[in-house]
Image: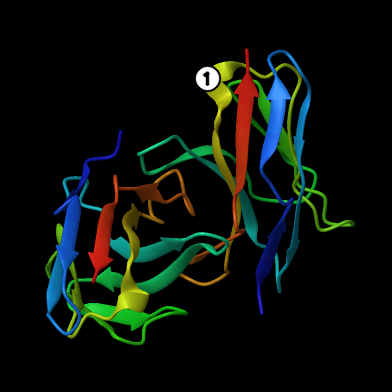
């Protein structure tokens, strides 16, 4: 299994509070991604990173920001959480320079509930 | 834009039955196609993939063939087991260096003994 951990694994918070989710990898992969998973929608890309301090928006980026100060860590921040951000969040990594181009490896997920 | 349409679920089968989960896609260029599987309480795992037309991906008895003419990538297995119960996601990768994935909505499979 790819070395990807996410923290916390579960979190309950209140509307309006800031929340930061962490993704940590030990594979030294260049690309990292944040997805959210909601019933009926599959997984949707929030933000991704193609290197340290290099990030870009995905299809559902409103209300989220990201940072990547080290290769191994990719942080997702909800500046002011809303109930519509209740979801399961997955981090993924990939390394297009490896033999397995295109393949993404997923972390175990973080279940976030915003009350 | 790119999109993936998956067979609506849930799907319930008896052990040893034949499985087909339909997946069709819309994409520009020549995407790579994937099937991911998610077991209860876990993240997604790559099940199989195909990177060009007529390629067949296979793993653990599952197969899918990249059909450009019908823009499809249907997942099949000849004889399912209870342990195959999971959610299955079809996905495509967009062209470009970041290779972002576009997912279908997922199909819940339950296999009964």
* Residue in front for this viewpoint, A16 or B93: A16
Residue displayed at 29% across by 39% down: A2
Residue B31 lies left or right of residue A13; in this view the side is right
User: In the rendered view, would you say A39 is above or below B113?
Assistant: below
Q: Is residue B32 above or below residue B2?
A: above
Disc 1 chain ID: B
Residue A32 vs residue B111, the one in the foreground: B111
Q: Residue A108 location in percent, x, y?
A: 29, 45
Residue B112: percent from the left, percent from the top?
63, 19
A48, above or below A108, in the image? below
Residue depicted at x 33% and y 74%: A85
Residue extending farthest right: B69
Quadrant of image for the N terminus of chain A = top left
Q: Which residue is mark 1?
A: B83
Q: Is residue A20 left or right of residue B37?
A: left
x%, y% of residue A71? 15, 62
């Amino acid at each position: 299994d790819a070395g990807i951990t996410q923290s916390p694994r579960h979190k309950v918070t209140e509307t309006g509070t800031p929340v930061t989710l962490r993704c940590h990898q030990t594979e030294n992969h260049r690309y990292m991604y944040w997805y959210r998973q909601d019933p009926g929608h599959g997984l949707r890309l929030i933000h991704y990173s193609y290197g340290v301090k290099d990030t870009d928006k995905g299809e559902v980026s409103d209300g989220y920001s990201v940072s990547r100060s080290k290769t191994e860590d990719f942080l997702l921040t909800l500046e002011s959480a809303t109930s519509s951000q209740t979801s399961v969040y997955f981090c993924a990594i990939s390394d297009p320079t490896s033999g397995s181009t295109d393949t993404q490896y997923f972390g175990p997920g973080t279940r976030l509930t915003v009350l | 834009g790119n999109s993936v349409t998956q067979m609506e679920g849930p799907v319930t089968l008896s052990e040893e039955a034949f499985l087909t989960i339909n997946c069709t896609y819309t994409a520009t260029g020549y995407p790579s196609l994937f099937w991911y599987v998610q077991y209860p309480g876990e993240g997604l795992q790559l099940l199989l993939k195909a990177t060009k037309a007529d390629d067949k991906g296979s793993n653990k008895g599952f197969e899918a063939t990249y059909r450009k003419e019908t823009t499809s990538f249907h997942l099949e297995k000849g004889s399912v087991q209870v342990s195959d119960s999971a959610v299955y996601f079809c996905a495509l990768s967009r062209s470009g260096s970041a290779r972002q994935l576009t997912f279908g909505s997922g199909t819940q499979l339950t296999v009964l003994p």
